[in-house]
Amino acid sequence: MLDLTLHSHDTGVPARAIAERQSIPEKYLEQILSILRKAGLVESIRGPSGGYFLSRPPELITVGQILRAVEGDLAPVKCVRQDKKGEGCKRSGICITKYVWARVRDGVNRITDSITLKDLAETYEKEVLEGYMYYI
């Protein structure tokens, strides 16, 4: 998603180009892009000038949205999942650690939902690209 943010300005980005830049197999990337497309985070155009692009501006897409689309619920344990796939436990009614795990889940969601692709792109450009240029 960061690659799309950095490289899709007015045109779509071919999966092959992303795979090469990120050093990941193109078939694996296409599986991830399919999941992101179904989640409404990316769109695609077929054809010779086609490719993938963000479905909305990078400041409107959060890391939390991306992670939940690809990984599912961000809960650290099953009993506090919010996606209705949470599994009950015999001790659920008397388990105080469930309170701890729910707070951890909420903290992870709050943090990842506060970071946008725009934030990542700005940090990447400042920390990585400028830092890299410093060492050359």
Image (cartoon, rainbow, N blue to C red):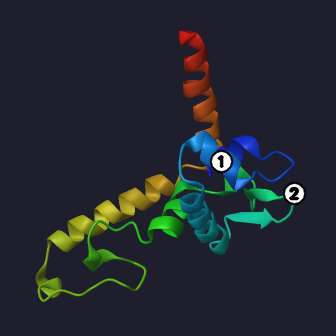
- At label 2, the amino acid type is Pro
**Residue 125 placed where, x, y %?**
63, 29
- Indicate whether 78 appears above or below 18: below
- Indicate whether 44 appears above or below 123: below
Q: Quadrant of residue 20?
A: top right
| Crowd around label 1: few <14 · some 14–19 · many ≥20 (10 Å) | some
**Residue 117 placed where, x, y %?**
62, 48
Judge by depth and name the residue closer to the eye, 51 or 93. Answer: 51
Which residue, given by chain and number where applicable, does mark 1 sit on? 18
Q: Check disc 1 and report its element: helix, strand or loop.
A: helix
**Residue 4 placed where, x, y %?**
69, 49
**Residue 116 placed where, x, y %?**
60, 50
- At label 1, the amino acid type is Ile
Q: Taking the image as drawn, is residue 78 in sight?
A: yes
| Crowd around label 2: few <14 · some 14–19 · many ≥20 (10 Å) | few
Disc 1 or disc 2, which is closer to the eye? Answer: 2
- Indicate whether 103 appears above or below 23: below
Judge by depth and name the residue closer to the eye, 85 or 98. Answer: 85
Picture quarter with the C terminus: top right
Q: Taking the image as drawn, is residue 119 in sight?
A: no
Total labels drawn: 2
Q: Which mark is residue 48?
A: 2
Query: Closer to the N terminus: mark 1 or mark 2?
Result: 1
Judge by depth and name the residue closer to the eye, 113 or 30. Answer: 30
Judge by depth and name the residue closer to the eye, 127 or 28. Answer: 28
Residue at screen point 30% across, 63% down: 103
Q: Quadrant of residue 28?
A: bottom right
Q: Which mark is residue 94?
A: none
Describe residue 72's horizontal placement relative to residue 13 as left or right: left
Describe residue 128's horizontal placement relative to residue 118 as left or right: left
